[in-house]
Structure formats: C-alpha cells, structure tokens
Amino acid sequence: MAHNNLGALYAKLGRVGDAIAEYEAALRIEPNVVEAETATRWGKSRVAKRRRCNICRAVRIAPSFAPAHYNLGIALAAIPGRAPEVNEMTRLSIPGNES
C-alpha cells in the first residue's frame, strides 16, 4: 500500500514517471490492487498523450519530415478507431508522398 500512496503523491506533484514506477512496484507486491492498476494505466496514457502532442508539434513544424509522420502513425495506432489517420501517416512517412 505504501507504493500506491507514494505513487499518488508523485502523481499530484506531476511526476508521472515516478508515479508509474511506484504503482508498478505496488502491483508486483500485490497484483490485484485495482487502484494501482487503474493509476498505472492513467499514468501511461498521460505519457502517451504527451508523446503524441510532441510528435504532432514536430509534424506541424516540419511537415515534409517523413520520420515524424511515421512516429505519429505508431503513436496513433495504439488508439482504437484511428486507423484512417494511421494509414495517412504511414503514407506520408514514405519519401515522395508528402502531397
């Protein structure tokens, strides 16, 4: 329970990575702690969202930079229902398909 509480404290402080580590430690000790499982998923979704935002920013700054489109496609693939956007990012990640 101490890891779960420390994870919650880290989350309130905005230290998402540390919070995830503590929640995962709690789950290793007691795998059926619903609060730790839910909080771990919350933290990982925050990290993924931040990563997508950073990649989107890269695509806006350099729209012809194919690796940014590829990375955005990979990030979007984890979200159900985003297949059309994933396909478009994959197409744009191939040099010469910028238009």
Image (cartoon, grey):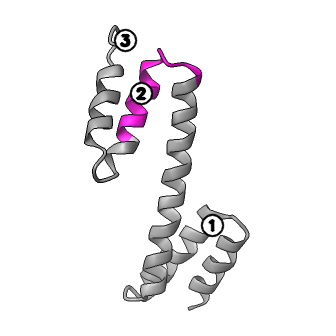
Asked if residue 19 lies left or right of residue 74, the reply is right
Q: Residue most toward the top?
A: 96
Mark 3 = which residue? 99
Q: Badge 1, how many Cα within 10 Å: few under 14, some, many 20+?
A: some
Q: Position of residue 86 (x, y in %)?
A: 31, 36
Within the magenta stretch, is there residue 63?
Answer: yes
What residue span does the magenta drawing correspond to?
A: 61-74
Residue at horizontal 69 percent and vertical 78 percent from the top: 9
In the image, residue 43 above or below residue 76: below
Q: Amino acid at mark 3?
A: Ser
Overall secondary structure of the magenta section: helix
Comparing labels 1 and 2, the label whose residue is closer to the camera:
2
Q: Position of residue 69 (x, y in %)?
A: 41, 27
Comparing labels 1 and 3, the label whose residue is closer to the camera:
3
Q: Position of residue 21 (x, y in %)?
A: 55, 69
Q: Secondary structure at mark 3?
A: loop
Closer to the chain start, of discs 1 and 3, is: 1
The mark found on residue 1 in the picture is none
Q: CA distance from mark 3 to mark 2?
A: 13 Å
The mark found on residue 69 in the picture is 2
Q: CA distance from mark 1 to mark 2?
A: 29 Å
Please report contact status of discs 3 and 2: CB closer than 8 Å, yes or no. no
Q: Badge 2, how many Cα within 10 Å: few under 14, some, many 20+?
A: many
Q: Amino acid at mark 1?
A: Asp
Closer to the chain start, of discs 1 and 2, is: 1
Residue at horizontal 29 percent and vertical 53 percent from the top: 80
Q: Quadrant of the C terminus?
A: top left
Number of labelled discs?
A: 3
The mark found on residue 18 in the picture is 1
Within the magenta stretch, is there residue 65?
Answer: yes
